[in-house]
Amino acid sequence: MWNTKEERCSLEETKDVFKDNGDLIDVPKQIKQLNHLRSMKMKKRIFTVVASVTMVLSLALTGCGKNVPTDNSSANKSNSKPIILRVGYILSTGSDADKGAEKFKELVNKNSNGRIDVQTFPNSQLGSDQDMINAQQSGSLEMEISGDGPVNIFEPGFGALTMPFAFRDTDHMLKVYNGPIGQQLNEAFVKDKGVRLVGVWARGPRYLTANKEIKTPADLQGYKLRVPTQTTYVETWKKLGAIPTALNLSELYTALQQGVVGGQENPLAIISTSSFFQVQKYVMDTQHVYGPYLVTVSDKFYSSLSADLKKVVEDALKEATTYEISVVKDGETQFRTELEKKGMKFVNVDRQAFLDKMQGLPEQLEKSLKWIPGQYQQIIDTK
């Protein structure tokens, strides 16, 4: 008998030690051979397990010494996951700002060789302008495209930039925003809200519409006009003799149709897409507001980018800016032609008469709204 467990073998293991004719062969010898084979198989299995464990530990230990990026703050190397750059805006798909954003996306995704992944979110998907400014401040949103609303909300001292009739044309507006005043605004945004002003785009100017011709302020006296609730707008149209009325844009068509208000003011794009041509006959060529689209970026995000990726973003913004401005200018001609075909008549106005009627108002608002002293005049004097 065999005294140890290893020396025993079962009936299944010993049945092969008998020949086909039933003659018994050297059983102990065969059992030793079987035990040897079993021992070899066991050693092979143990070796396989040890090798597998060693490989896992090796990979784990190798990874421990690396700073693997888990967010955008450290994902700047070419072998890292793409950096996500989300661009939010309240404007609709197909708008001038959306077209500019899509051009920026195309350029960055291409020129970064996949190291940055730009994602666009139009139609207020990421909230209001105020929501998105706050998100940039916290670093949870990378970029936003807005109108000049955030200027009044977050930097009211720069309110002169939103004053009607302050800008003569798009070029004048761009010179101001891209000059010393724009630089001061950028510094204030960085200091107060942690966002950088990295681009200034164009948008179509605002026009007055009505069911009568309005060539001078005298034609506006007592006329009910829907205007945005922004203080500079309300006070301007009061000064010009109109009766400003606050209405949501969604309510404006019905209000015009029912005569609740006699007129309104908006860019040609909105006049066209909102079908105001069905309830308004005249477009006064006032072009009284040349507002920008402001492109802002989270300072936290921008500071985290490597120098070469900053250049990719900046170069893309320059090209996208040129493209967006051309889209706006082409769109103005197109919308004007379309509105004329639909029966609207464009009326020339005495712009100087409107400016004369407004005398003293900018200085009054500068004091009451605490604008930066002298900034309105600085805007006017920019050539």
Image (cartoon, rainbow, N blue to C red):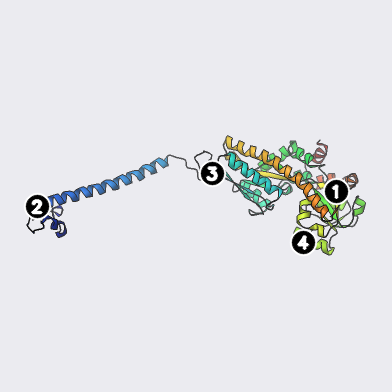
Disc 2 vs disc 4: which is toward the camera? 2
Number of residues whose C-alpha sits closer than 10 Å to that of mark 1, classed few (under 14), some (14–19) or many (20 or more): many
Could you tell me which residue is drawn at 90 percent across and 51 percent down?
217
For the C terminus, the image quarter is top right
Q: Which mark is residue 285?
A: 1
Q: Position of residue 277 (x, y in %)?
A: 81, 57
Dot 3: what SS? loop
Quadrant of res 373:
top right
Q: Amino acid at mark 4?
A: Glu
Label 1 vs 2, first from the N-terminus: 2
Residue that mark 4 sits on = 251
Q: CA distance from mark 4 to mark 1?
A: 24 Å
Please say if the residues under marks 3 and 2 sit with CB atoms less than 8 Å apart.
Answer: no
Label 2 vs 4, first from the N-terminus: 2
Number of residues whose C-alpha sits closer than 10 Å to that of mark 4, classed few (under 14), some (14–19) or many (20 or more): few
Please say if 209 is above or below 326: below
Q: Amino acid at mark 3?
A: Pro
Label 4 vs 3, first from the N-terminus: 3
Q: Give the camera-side residue of 186 and 28.
A: 28
For the N terminus, the image quarter is bottom left
Q: Position of residue 34 (x, y in %)?
A: 15, 51
Number of residues whose C-alpha sits closer than 10 Å to that of mark 2, classed few (under 14), some (14–19) or many (20 or more): some
Q: Position of residue 319 (x, y in %)?
A: 67, 39
Label 3 vs 2, first from the N-terminus: 2
Disc 3 vs disc 2: which is toward the camera? 2
Residue that mark 3 sits on = 82
Label 1 vs 3, first from the N-terminus: 3
